[in-house]
Image (tube, grey):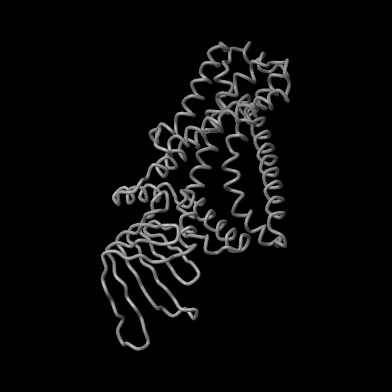
Amino acid sequence: MNRIDRYVSGLFWASFIGGSLVFVTIFLAVDAMSTMVSHKGLGLGVLANYYLYYVPEIFNKLLPVACLMGVILAISTMNKANELVALFAAGMSLFRITLPLLIWVGVISGVAFFAMDRLGPTMNRKKNFILYNEIEKKPSMYSVVKTNKIWYRSKNAIFNIKTLSLQGDTAQSLTLYFFSPEWDLLQMITADKVELGQSTWNLIDGSVTLFTGNSSFPLTSQFKTKKIAMGEDAKDLQSTGQTSEALSQAELSRFIDRNKEAGLDTNRYEVDFHSKYSYAMAGLVMCLLGIPFSVGKARSGGTMMNIGIVILLVFGYWILLSSSLTLGMHGHFNPIVAAWAPNLLMAGLAYFFLLRLKR
């Protein structure tokens, strides 16, 4: 790395770190105020623990914006001081000048993806545990997602489910444990398949085991179909669902394979799986698109115009990404296409504007 690369890198890191701090601080301030207003009497300790586990997720979401801000402000600073003109006159191309910026964005994105894949699921589970147990005061809404089974707890029962459909209306390999108020095991019900209704569950091919103090052995009977009243439990289980944020990429891949084997819809999970990879490249793609605008507005726009460009680029990308992922989750796009189409379109647009610069 020569002196020019070090200088350009220094400009980028100053803008990137400053932008990250500003974006994360604004997000935290707004979200924390909203949380405190919605939940009166919330302790500062609980709030601090919640955001301690939430900050990495926030930073990861805002990372492409911070990278774009760092690149545009670095180039704008050089542009305003006529340093770009001098470098062009010395025979350096725009690609060579911005190469260290793109390398740093790629390194940051790769490290962030690796870190979130390893640490993100654990932090997400801890964050949700605090949210449902200490903030929302709804512990029944908290579900722990494991790689092999799903556990859910209601007021007097514990459910063990192998797989749950996307809509939350069907389940495979269900075991229900019912307890007394003193938490003595009263009844165990198993079923190969379950149709989850709003207030009743239809169990197919299972057994009922009763545990009573009058008998030395539990009493077990088989059934082909059985209906049980579950009240609000079915709604709670459906609303929690399964989130890909609670799984690493390897765990999510195995989760998709198991659901496919069970004949369940995995479209949404496949979109989430591929979108994590594509989102890791979002910062690099958005920076490529931001470069020609920074150079093209050499001395006429100023910093505020370039910041406005950042906002417009981010807004346009998010609209495109959200629309594509939604269409993919509803089966209108292939999951891979839904996840990568926004990046490819943005990269194509960046290539078009870079060609027009002829630098």
Q: Nearer the viewer, residue 288 or 218?
A: 218
Residue at 71% across / 47% down in the picture? Answer: 29
Q: Quadrant of residue 201?
A: bottom left
Question: Which image quarter holds the C terminus?
Answer: top right
Residue 260, position as x, y percentages in the image: 31, 47
| Quarter of the view holding residue 330 | top left
The part of the image, by quadrant, that contains residue 160 is: bottom left
In this picture, residue 61 sits left or right of residue 238: right
- Quadrant where the N terminus is found in the figure: top right
Left or right of residue 105: residue 33: right
Q: Nearer the viewer, residue 196 or 41?
A: 196
Place of residue 11 in the rendered image (x, y in percent of width and height, measured from the top left):
67, 30
Provide residue 199's location: percent of width, then percent of height: 45, 61
Total numbered labels: 0
Q: Does residue 252 lie above or below 185 as drawn?
A: above
Residue 295 percent across, percent down from the top left: 64, 17
- Tell whether 207 sits left or right of 347: left
* Residue shown at the point (48%, 44%) measured from the top left: 114
Q: Residue at x 52, y 28 (%)?
A: 285
Of 325 and 157, nearer the camera is 157
Towards the viewer: 41 or 303: 41
